[in-house]
Structures are given as C-alpha cells and as structure tokens.
Image (cartoon, rainbow, N blue to C red):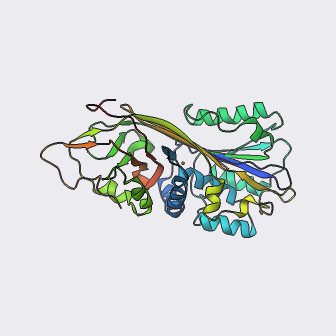
Amino acid sequence: MNQNKRTFGAFNEANAPVFNFGGVVTAEEPIDRESLRTVTERMYQFSSKFYKALINSVDSNVICSPLSVGIVLSMAAFGTRGFTAQQLRSTLNRVTSSELKLAQKIFIKDGFEVKSEFKNVLKSNFESEVQSLDFNNSEQASQTINNWCSSKTNGRIKEVLSPSVVREALIILVNAVYVNVLVALDATYVELPYKGSNFEDSISMFIILPNKNSGLKRVENGFDTINFKLMYEFCRKTEMFLYLPKFKFESKFYLTQILQSMGITDVFINGANFSGISETIPLKIDEVIQKAFIQVDENGTEAAAITATTMLFGSCYPAPQPLPITFNVDHPFAYAIYHGASNTVLFQGHVTSLPPVVDGRQ
C-alpha cells in the first residue's frame, strides 16, 4: 500500500562521471518497525536540517520526504571511500540504513562493471533489485525507469527522469515512498488518524496551524523541537468542527545546492571518491532531484515522493470540551504525515496558498 517517491542522481562519464540516483520506498512488504525506528532516530537531525534548508529556497506550497533523500544518499554512501565517505556520513549523522528493509531499484548501463561488493551491500541492506538497461537507447530506458516509478507510486509520479539524463548516466538508484489512506472523519484533533491495516495502522496527519496568519516561518524554524511522539501519544480526543480546504499539488526540487549548503560537497566534485563502486572509472554525483505529490480531500490523504541523486502542542487540546471545538484552517500552515509505531515522519511540508472554505465546503 505504501510506495515512495525517490531522489535521483546519475553517474556520467565525462572527466569524472556523474551519479544520478533516486529511491522509492514501498510498504507492500512487511517493514521491520524496530529497524525503521533505529534509522529514523539516526536520521532525525539530517531531516530537520534538510527541511530548513529546503524551505528557505522556496516560497510556494511544499511537499517533500527528507527520509527518502536520506535513504538514497545512504545507498550512495556505501560506495564512497576516504574523505568523501567521511563528509557524507557525517552529514547523514552516521545513517547507514543497513537495518531498513524497503523496496529499491538499481538500473545499470549495459556493459558498465560495478563492484560485486557494492551490489551485494545494496542487495542485502536495501533489498535492491539490479537491472541492466541500454542507456544509449535513452527514450526506451527512461520510459522503463519512469514506468517503474509510476507503478510504485500508484501512477502519481510519472515523469522523473528525462532521456537526456539517462543517456549520460552509468548508474541510477531509485527509492520511492507512497502513502494512500482514508481519513477517519470523526478524528478529534488536528492530528488526523487514518484508517488502514498493517503499516498504515498508526499513520496520522498533523496539521500545525500558527496562531498568527504570518507565523508559519516561526513554526518551521522550530521544526526540530517538535516532538511528534509526545503529540501523538498525549493528545486527547474531543469533538471538533474541522474546516480544512482541499488541496492538491506536487513539488520538484533540484537539491544539489541545498545539500552543498548542508556540508555535502565532496560527492559533487571531480575528485569524489566512489571507488567502492568502481576503481576504473571516476564517479561523482551530478544532480539530486526530488519530485513529490500530495492530495488532501474528503476521501483522505494521498502522498508520494521520489528523490534522485521529500515543540507544538497548540494543536492538541488538553481536555475534552463541553461543546465541539471549531478548528478553521484558513491561513498558511505546516503539516507532517507521521507513522506512530516507528516514530517516523514520512512526509512534511507547508501550504502557503490555499483555496477558501465556505461553511466547511470548498
């Protein structure tokens, strides 16, 4: 049911080849929640820093999955050595994703030799499938990759890689995250629980509405202090009239400059050390791209993300009220899609441009 969007980068062969990679995380297979919790705790600082850097560069609606970016960079990190490895893993806060069992895919150009150790590590740690493609036939190869991405995100993420990107690549790593659940309309918080099964049992959407119309920036600057676990566990149920406008949008970000601002620089230069992947051809990361989609309406929330190389208690009412509370989402707000069992933020973003709500309807 869960499928994820990805980050993409590409290994190219010019001076130092570039590395295009991306990732899709799906929950069609059972997920080890303890493993996911371990990875999430290690990645928390990276996710907070990444989100702050991202929102500082945009002024529109945002949907992203820092988790997806971190997983894909972790996959690439297994192929790094020397200072490149030290810098990348330091920024990732020593995230290895070695315990995380999620669906991935590796596409390799026909004839390009990748170290068997690297393929084995990705297969054992990420359960990644490896498929060779004729990247010279870039139209067909990009269609194959994009079709795979589409199938893992229920058709929500389609055009991720263009033929021109695939033509110059040697390796493409893909990771996807996808969430599609039904809202329990009798939810009483601004934490909206979802109906579902298995992995979806404890997925919620938190709507974080600033008290002031202009307060979104202050909220997001303090995102790293928000304790979603406490919000999730200690909010009490109360009846409420929730006025939440429908919204639907997608985001596409080129993340190289953002990652460089976070201290990840060595992987992008000609001297990058990816000798854990290949000792015969020098590699570097060319670009990291994330494309993400979200839709919220009366049927629930649907979100997906693709990445290639996405303390506030004011929303939780402390005690039941004698009359239903009215919660009117009528100005810019932040949100997070959260998996309670593993204390994992799957997606987060903000809505700065939203349609009006009239009498609870759009």
Residue 243 sits in which quadrant?
top left
x then y, percent, for residue 13: 84, 50
Q: Position of residue 192 (x, y in %)?
A: 33, 44
Farthest residue, direction front: 214
Q: Quadrant of the C terminus?
A: top left
Closest to the observer: 244 or 232?
Answer: 244
Q: Is residue 21 above or below residue 185?
A: below
Q: Which one is in front, 351 or 184?
A: 351
Q: Position of residue 290 (x, y in %)?
A: 60, 46
Residue 347 lies left or right of residue 329; in this view the side is right
Q: Residue at x 38, y 31 (%)?
A: 299
Q: Quadrant location of residue 182?
A: top left
Report the front residue among 253 and 296: 253
In the rendered image, is residue 28 in sight? no
Whether residue 91 sits left or right of residue 60 in the image: it is right
Q: Is residue 149 left or right of residue 280?
A: left
Residue found at the very far left of the displayed protein: 322
Say which residue appears at 57% left-offset and 50% top-offset.
68
Q: Is residue 228 among what the camera can see?
A: yes
